[in-house]
Amino acid sequence: MKFFATVREATGVKNIEMDADTIREVLDSLQVTFGDRFTQTVIEPSTGNLKQFFSCMVNGKRIELLNGYDTKLVDNDAVALFPPVGGG
């Protein structure tokens, strides 16, 4: 799993390897592993989902185009978590 920008700041690492069957399991594990700073930065408390405009991709595809938080993962899937992107 790769982290970018504010997500990387919240975890203190660029990437991490983990075992999980779904994106939901990944997010749950990340909250346990990285604690309050990660959770407050990335997770919407009322839903347990990513905060608005955060993006999660599996092998370069947004989870919204797959099965969302129920997206199944297999060995060597590349998962990336991005914060909102500002523009101008």
Image (cartoon, rainbow, N blue to C red):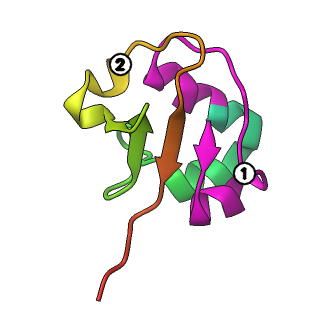
Q: Residues within 10 Å of mark 2 (few under 14, many from 20)?
A: some
Which span of residues is magenta-colored?
A: 1-29
Q: What residue is drawn where x is 71% and y is 43%?
A: 15
Inter-mark Cα distance, 1 to 2 = 23 Å
**Position in image of residue 4 (x %, y %):** 58, 58
Decide whether residue 73 is among the magenta residues: no
Q: Quadrant of the N terminus?
A: top right
Of the image marks 1 and 2, the number of the one nearer the N terminus: 1
Left or right: 82 with respect to 60? right
Q: Is residue 38 above or below residue 62?
A: below
Left or right: 76 with respect to 84? right
**Position in image of residue 8 (x %, y %):** 67, 57
Amino acid of disc 1:
Lys
Q: Is residue 23 above or below residue 40?
A: above
- For residue 14, say whether it is visible: yes
The residue that disc 1 covers is 14
The residue that disc 2 covers is 71
Decide whether residue 15 is among the magenta residues: yes
